[in-house]
Amino acid sequence: MSRITTPFTHDSTAAEVIDGVDLTGRRAVVTGGASGIGVETARALAAAGDARIVSVSSSAHLRSDVHLDDLHFEHRPYEEWAAYGQSKTANVLFAVEAAKRWASDGIITNALMPGGIRTALQRHVDPEVQKGWDRFQWKTTEQGASTSVLLAASPLIAGVTGRYFEDNNEALPNTGAEMSGVAAYALDPESATRLWDISETLLAG
């Protein structure tokens, strides 16, 4: 069997290896993409056309900021909806920080609220609680997927990063009067950086 050789050597970079390759329309999932070989792989693929990150949040982020000094409810009473809201705020803050870190590499990261959709998720919620949800304007699953797909694939979002969307448009600031829009704390750059650093520490531990 003949040995396979290429024009590349020990010193060739990922960008050089992929130079001239058009991966537009292809999808690549890079695990460990935050550092080392993974981040260089992501950068090279981004330059060839793959790289949008979509973080699915929820209007439930309006229920709670991320309590950076007590993420795990060790020093306050646990409340399930506050915990869920905190996790959804974290989704938005991830997009804010990822956008700051990776925008120069062509990696677009945005967060979104898909809308109220009747899915299997509700099987975990008390039916009595769900009775109060009749005021919501529910979406079909096809409608609920639209904002995710917009952020993942539409040329209309080219170059737009670190934002929060709902109903296929960037969300307005929340006024406190209803469960729509984005809370100012969810877009706070200092909180985003602190949460990222804390997350790295937790993952390393």
Image: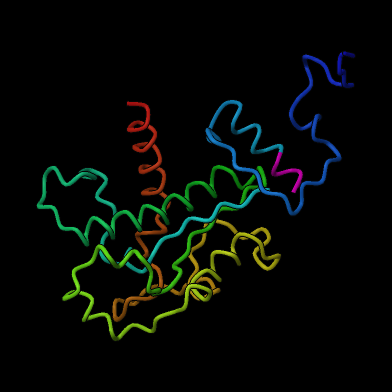
Residue closest to the eye, 101 or 58: 58
Visual colour scheme: rainbow
**Is residue 123 found inside the magenta-colored segment of the image?**
no
Percent position of residue 189, x then y: 43, 51
The answer to which image quadrant residue 62 occupies is bottom left
Residue that appears at 41% across and 52% down = 93
Q: Which residue shows up at 47% across the image and 47% down it?
A: 97
Residue at left offset 36%, top offset 69%: 59
Most frequent secondary structure within the magenta stretch: helix
| Quadrant in which the C terminus appears | top left
Viewed as shown, does residue 164 lie left or right of 149?
left
Would residue 35 appear left or right of 178 to someone viewing this image? Answer: right
Name the spot of residue 185 as percent of width and height, x first. 34, 59
Position above or below: 4 against 76: above
40, above or below 145, in the image: above
**Residue 145 x, y percent position in the rendering:** 52, 68
Q: Locate the N terminus by quadrant.
A: top right
Q: Nearer the viewer, residue 30 or 106?
A: 30
Magenta-highlighted residues: 45-49
Number of numbered discs present?
0
Q: Residue furthest front?
A: 1
Quadrant assignment, res 42: top right
Q: Is residue 126 above or below residue 25?
A: below
> What is the x, y in percent for residue 27?
67, 48
Task: Tell whether 128 sits left or right of 188.
Answer: left
Q: Which residue is pictured at 71% across the width and 65% down the height?
A: 155
